[in-house]
Image (cartoon, grey):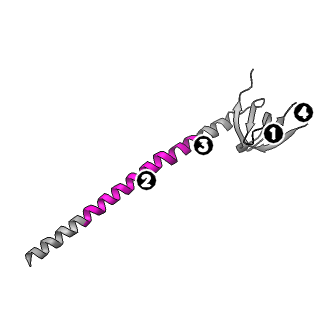
């Protein structure tokens, strides 16, 4: 009878140890996902936000569709971009449509 209680206690201890190791492995996997997926995405978003905040009138920009243009006007969320040498080709677009900015030479 005494041996039964010892075996039962040993089984409970082993199950508890397995539960802790499973929790530790889940936490480790979540940490890996955070450092491999979330942090780089936050860095990229911060970099793009800084690029959009540093835009000035006269800068040459590349849109997400690959068109080159010159910034004519900037508002909070929108910009007006002039494309080509035709002064009548001015298109308003969101700042999020700007993929790259090349600073104007002064």
- Looking at the rendering, which quadrant does residue 102 occupy? top right
| Residue 55 on image: x %, y % | 71, 33
Q: Residue at x 17, y 73 (%)?
A: 8
Ranked by sequence position, the earlier of labels 3 and 4 is 3
Question: Disc 2 designates what residue?
Answer: 30
Characterize the local packing of mark 2: few (<14), some (14-19) or many (20 or more) Cα atoms within 10 angstroms: few
Pair 1/2: label in front:
2
Ranked by sequence position, the earlier of labels 2 and 3 is 2
| Residue 43 on image: x %, y % | 55, 41
Q: Residue at x 78, y 29 (%)?
A: 58
Residue 80 image label: 1
Q: Mark 4 and mark 2: span between their CA atoms?
A: 53 Å
Is 77 above or below relative to 85? below
Question: Disc 4 designates what residue?
Answer: 87
Residue toward you, 1 or 42: 1
Question: Disc 3 designates what residue?
Answer: 45
Pair 1/4: label in front:
4
Q: Mark 3 and mark 4: span between their CA atoms?
A: 33 Å
Give, as a single range, the part of the protein colored magenta.
Answer: 15-44
Q: Mark 2 and mark 3: span between their CA atoms?
A: 21 Å
Dot 1 falls on a residue whose secondary structure is strand
Dot 2 falls on a residue whose secondary structure is helix
| Residue 29 on image: x %, y % | 41, 53
Q: Check if mark 4's residue and mark 2's residue have beta carbons within 8 Å.
A: no
Magenta region's main secondary structure?
Answer: helix
- Is 38 displayed left or right of 8 in the figure? right
Q: Residue at x 88, y 38 (%)?
A: 89
| Residue 39 on image: x %, y % | 51, 44
Taking the magenta stretch, the answer to whether it contains residue 88 is no
């Amino acid at each position: 009878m005494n041996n039964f209680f010892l075996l039962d206690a040993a089984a409970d201890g082993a199950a508890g140890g397995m539960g802790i190791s499973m929790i530790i492995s889940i936490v480790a996997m979540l940490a890996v996902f955070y450092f491999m997926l979330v942090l780089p995405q936050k860095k990229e978003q911060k970099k793009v936000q800084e690029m959009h905040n540093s835009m000035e009138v006269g800068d040459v920009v590349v849109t997400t569709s690959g068109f080159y243009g010159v910034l004519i006007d900037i508002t909070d969320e929108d910009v007006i971009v002039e494309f080509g040498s035709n002064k009548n080709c001015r298109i308003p677009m969101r700042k999020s449509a700007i993929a790259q900015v090349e600073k104007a030479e002064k």
